[in-house]
Image (tube, rainbow, N blue to C red):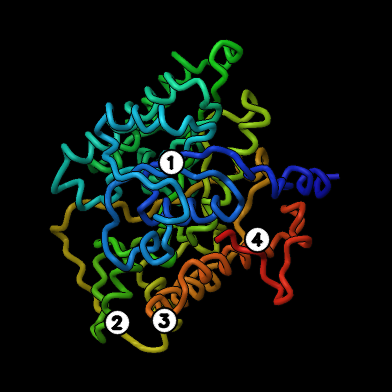
């Protein structure tokens, strides 16, 4: 009986997203670009609001998403511009990913971090509050929103929020702002009056193709490998819940669909993390990257006087598994292999098609979760990509 329930819960309608009006903030960023691309594949009417891409080799740029979705450049801190964009696109579903995403940068620019991650959340939720078309809002935060006690078991959604550094603190604040809006303006007891379902999604240490941010171990590793230099590793013994970008994104999509259909039942906070086997030290992760690349080395540049970062942080994903029927599909080796493939091919390959193929591969790991999976295969065995 349990397995039957799991299969039923994990079923996602492949055609659900077709024609849905979806707004993604931060769509030019790493996670935002993959989410926008996936939604585009699924037939959604995607609008994006974000800053300019970081580099010319970003996933957003190389996949030519500017010409595939309704693309707008804007700052999440600019309330008037954001509000006008909401008026133009009248979204039904909103994914909020625009953020200052780096711990070390938050030490350098704490005000920018709080203005973006806290003030930006307020701006986003206020625009949603004043836009009648909005039905579902998913605020993407981070696993670092928890008060980290450096314990060996995973944090649950009802554990205490906190944050040592400005980034982590700002994301905990974003969670608190979201909870206040849920209780004050989107209260589920009065759902008929507002018609909006609000959730937060917590994931961390995500990697995949097309990320060129500094102070992230995977893009830092790729830059060093491309230049034939040793990889600089600051905290080789720190343990993180590593996962490919498609893992949490599949959770966000599944959560939003559930919220759209049963808005009262699925509002709230959710963790999206890997299985225990993907909790690795930074040094072990770099070893696997070097192995997948085919050559390279790394050096330990630990600095006892460096700004504080957590040594161990794990997530408990029981709620996502039991309530959403979501679970990770790719192990750490598969995740690293697909990531390295992107970076080894981005100069010579059609990146949109490469991303489509990786998404198709990911989806095929659980073909029963997509109702029309078998009906959409091409003669070569790949799913169709919406161009």
The mark closer to the camera, 4 or 1, is: 4
Alpha carbon of mark 2 to alpha carbon of mark 4: how far?
A: 30 Å
Badge number at residue 178: none
Q: Earlier in the sequence, mark 4 or mark 1?
A: 1
Alpha carbon of mark 4 to alpha carbon of mark 1: how far?
A: 22 Å
Quarter occupied by residue 384: bottom right
- Dot 2 corresponds to which residue? 226
Q: Earlier in the sequence, mark 3 or mark 4?
A: 3
Q: Residue at x 62, y 65 (%)?
A: 360
The secondary element bearing badge 1 is classed as strand
Above or below — where is 367 with respect to 101? below
- Dot 1 corresponds to which residue? 140
Callouts 2 and 1 close, C-beta under 8 Å: no
Alpha carbon of mark 2 to alpha carbon of mark 1: how far?
A: 31 Å
Q: Earlier in the sequence, mark 2 or mark 3?
A: 2
Position of the C terminus by quadrant: bottom right
- Dot 3 corresponds to which residue? 348
Q: Earlier in the sequence, mark 2 or mark 1?
A: 1
**Residue 68 spot, x, y in % from top left:** 47, 55
The mark closer to the camera, 2 or 3, is: 3
**Residue 184 spot, x, y in % from top left:** 44, 13
Q: Earlier in the sequence, mark 2 or mark 4?
A: 2
149 horizontally vs 202: left or right: left
Callouts 2 and 3 close, C-beta under 8 Å: no
Q: Residue at x 52, y 25 (%)?
A: 133
Badge number at residue 363: 4
Classify mark 4: residues with Cα within 10 Å, few (<14), some (14-19) or many (20+): some
The secondary element bearing badge 3 is classed as loop
Residue lying farthest to the right in this orientation: 1
The secondary element bearing badge 4 is classed as helix
Q: Nearer the viewer, residue 45 or 112?
A: 45
The secondary element bearing badge 2 is classed as helix
């Amino acid at each position: 009986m349990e397995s039957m329930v799991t299969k039923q819960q994990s079923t996602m309608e492949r055609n659900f997203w077709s024609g849905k009006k979806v707004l993604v903030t931060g769509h030019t960023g790493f996670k935002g670009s993959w989410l926008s691309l996936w939604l585009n594949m699924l037939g959604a009417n995607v609008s994006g609001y974000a800053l300019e891409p970081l580099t010319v080799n970003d996933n957003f740029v190389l996949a030519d998403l500017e010409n595939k979705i309704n693309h707008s450049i804007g700052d999440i801190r600019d309330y008037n511009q954001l509000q006008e964009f909401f008026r133009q696109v009248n979204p039904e579903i909103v994914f909020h990913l625009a953020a200052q995403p780096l711990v070390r940068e938050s030490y350098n620019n704490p005000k920018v971090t709080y203005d973006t991650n806290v003030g930006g959340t307020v701006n986003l939720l206020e625009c949603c509050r004043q836009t009648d078309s909005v039905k579902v809002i998913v605020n993407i935060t981070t696993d670092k929103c928890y008060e980290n006690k450096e314990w060996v078991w995973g944090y649950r959604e009802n554990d205490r929020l906190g944050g040592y550094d400005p980034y982590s603190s700002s994301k905990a604040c974003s969670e608190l702002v979201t909870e206040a809006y849920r209780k004050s303006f989107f209260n589920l007891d009065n759902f008929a009056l507002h018609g909006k379902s609000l959730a937060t999604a917590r994931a961390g240490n995500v990697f995949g193709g097309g990320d060129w941010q500094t102070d992230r171990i995977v893009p830092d590793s790729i830059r060093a490998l491309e230049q034939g230099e040793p990889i600089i590793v600051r905290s080789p013994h720190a343990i993180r819940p590593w996962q490919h970008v498609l893992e949490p994104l599949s959770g966000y999509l599944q959560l939003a669909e559930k919220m759209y259909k049963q808005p009262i039942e699925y509002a709230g906070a959710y963790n999206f993390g890997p299985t225990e086997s993907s909790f690795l030290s930074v040094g072990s992760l770099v070893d696997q990257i070097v192995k997948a690349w085919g050559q390279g080395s790394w050096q330990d540049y630990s600095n006892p006087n460096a700004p504080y970062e957590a040594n161990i942080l794990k997530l408990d994903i029981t709620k996502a598994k039991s309530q959403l029927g979501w679970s990770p599909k790719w192990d750490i080796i598969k995740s690293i292999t697909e990531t390295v493939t992107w970076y080894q091919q981005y100069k010579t390959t059609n990146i949109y098609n490469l991303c489509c193929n990786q998404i198709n591969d990911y989806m095929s790991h659980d073909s029963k979760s997509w109702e029309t999976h078998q009906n959409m295969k091409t003669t070569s065995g790949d799913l169709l990509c919406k161009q």
